[in-house]
Image: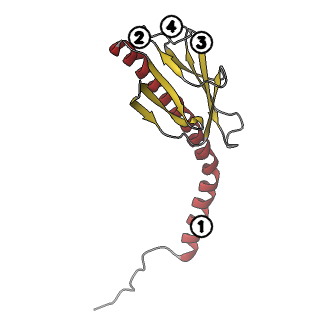
Amino acid sequence: MVMLPSRQEGFTVIELMIVLLVVGVLATIAAPSFSGMIAKNRVKAASSNLHLSLLKARSEAAKRNASITVSPNAGGWVSGWRVLAGATVLAQEGPVSGVTITTDPNPLPSVVYLSSGRTQGGASVTFEVEDSGDILPDRDLRCVVLSLSGMPAVKEGPC
C-alpha cells in the first residue's frame, strides 16, 4: 500500500493577517458614514415623535371637546414633553439625546389645543430640530411647523 502525503487545509498566518488588514481598512472608511447616519436618524426620530405628539393632542382636543396641552419637561423641549388633559398625562416623551430643539416664539412654554383643533392664540409655531454634535459637516435640520389651523407638519431643512 502506498501512502500519499496528507494535504494540509486551512489558512496560513500571512493570509489571515492580510484579511484582517483589509477588514480593518474597510471598517475605518465606513465608520464616519455610520455616525452621520446615526445623527440623521436621531434628528428624524425626534422630529417625528414631536409631530406625533402634536397630532395626538389635536385629535384628543377634538375628541374630548376640551383643551389639551403639550408642554416641555423641566429643562426645555430637549428634556422631553407631555400631552396633558388637565392634570391627566395622555402621553409622555422622554429626553432626546444628540439633538437640540429651538422654538419660535422662543421660549415656548407650551402648545394648547382648543376643542376646535386650533392652537390657543392662533399663532404659527415652529420647532427646529437639529443635530447637536459636530458629526455632520452640513447639519441635518428638520422643522416641525404648526399652521394657523393647528395642523402640524414636518419638513426637511431650516424653518
* Tag 2: amino acid: Ser
Which residue appears at 37% of the width and 18% of the height? 60
Residue 105 as seen in the image, left or right of residue 114: right
Q: For the point 59% across and 40% down, which residue is it?
A: 39
| Callout 3 crowding tier (Cα within 10 Å): few <14, some 14–19, many ≥20 | some
Residue furthest to the left: 1
**SS of the residue under disc 3:** loop
Q: CA distance from mark 2 to mark 3?
A: 17 Å
User: What whole-number distance in Å separates the C-alpha atoms at marks 1 and 2?
Assistant: 68 Å
Q: Which x, y percent locates residue 9?
A: 42, 76
In the figure, residue 141 lies in which quadrant? top right
Which amino acid is tagged 1?
Ile
Q: Position of residue 21 (x, y in %)?
A: 61, 64
Task: Give how far across and how far down residue 25 sits, in percent.
Answer: 63, 58
Residue position for label 1 = 18
Q: Earlier in the sequence, mark 1 or mark 2?
A: 1
Amino acid type assigned to the residue bearing label 4 in the image: Ser
> Quadrant of the image for the C terminus?
top right
* Residue type (three-letter) at the residue carrying disc 3: Ser
Residue 115 numbered mark, or none: 2
Per the rendering, the mark at residue 149 is: 4
Q: Are marks 4 and 3 in contact (CB under 8 Å)?
A: no
Mark 4 and mark 1: Cα distance apart in space:
63 Å
- Residue 47 lies, with reference to residue 5, above or below; the image says above
- Residue at numbered disc 3: 124
